[in-house]
Amino acid sequence: MNKVLLLDFECRPINICSWKRALILLMKGKAVNARRLNDIDSMIRIENILIPNVIKLTYRLAVPYQELPFCRENILVRDEFVCQYCGKKFPADELTLDHVYPKSRLGPDIWENIVACCRECNQKKADRTPKEARMKLLRRPYRPKDYLMFELKKYPEHIVRQWLDYFEAS
Ligand SMILES: [Zn+2]
């Protein structure tokens, strides 16, 4: 988990990058340590090099809008690995994706129509709508808005905690 939060010139979070990329940016003078205090807890140690876990670009950059990829992993992360029918949490490989409005009836492949679903619930629901199957969705599926906030869900809490200040400030 040697990842670095990258801030733009105005100190707004723009990306999460590898320590290698961070090191290159720092060495080229394209980025600097974003923290005023150099405390050891906010450094990543790679052999005998210390890399700050938040860096800031030294130049202005127009950041293009990033669309969150629509894929199985991101749907499972959005639904927090919880079957959206029975409410139980499962390991990723025990979850399936369910088309709320069935695929067999041309239910579309979109964020708003796909949910994490355990095998048992998927079998039970089969090619029916939740109403027909008398199964209730925990919540209506949605398209996550903020790309970077969403990416944070994939990182351990102790790392996110060190980055969160920069999100709240922006
Ligand atoms: Zn289930």
Image: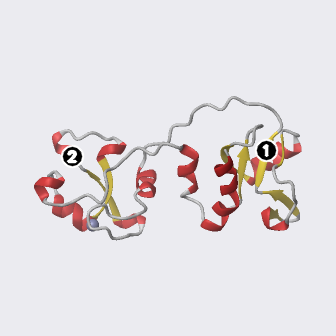
Q: Is residue 26 left or right of residue 161?
A: right
Residue 48 occupies quadrant = bottom right
Residue 97 lies, in percent from the top left, at 32, 54
Q: CA distance from mark 1 to mark 2?
A: 45 Å
Q: Residue at 88% across / 45% down in the picture?
A: 27
User: In this rendering, would 44 be left or right of 167?
Assistant: right
The location of residue 142, given as percent across then percent down, is 37, 46
SS class of the residue under badge 1? strand
**Foreground pick, 133 / 1:** 133
Inspect the image, locate mark 1, and give the three-letter code of the amino acid beneath it.
Lys
Q: Residue at x 41, y 43 (%)?
A: 143
Pick whichever of labels 1 and 2 is earlier in the sequence. 1
Ligand 1 is in which quadrant of the figure?
bottom left
Q: Which residue is mark 1?
A: 56
Cβ(mark 2) to ligand 1 < 8 Å?
no
Query: In the rendered image of this protein, does residue 97 appear above or below residue 60?
Result: below
> What residue do we see at 16% from left, 41% from top?
105
Q: Quadrant of the C terminus?
A: top right
**Relative image position of residue 116 (x, y in whole percent):** 34, 58
Q: Which mark, by number, is residue 101?
A: 2
Identify which amino acid the numbered label 2 is placed on: Tyr
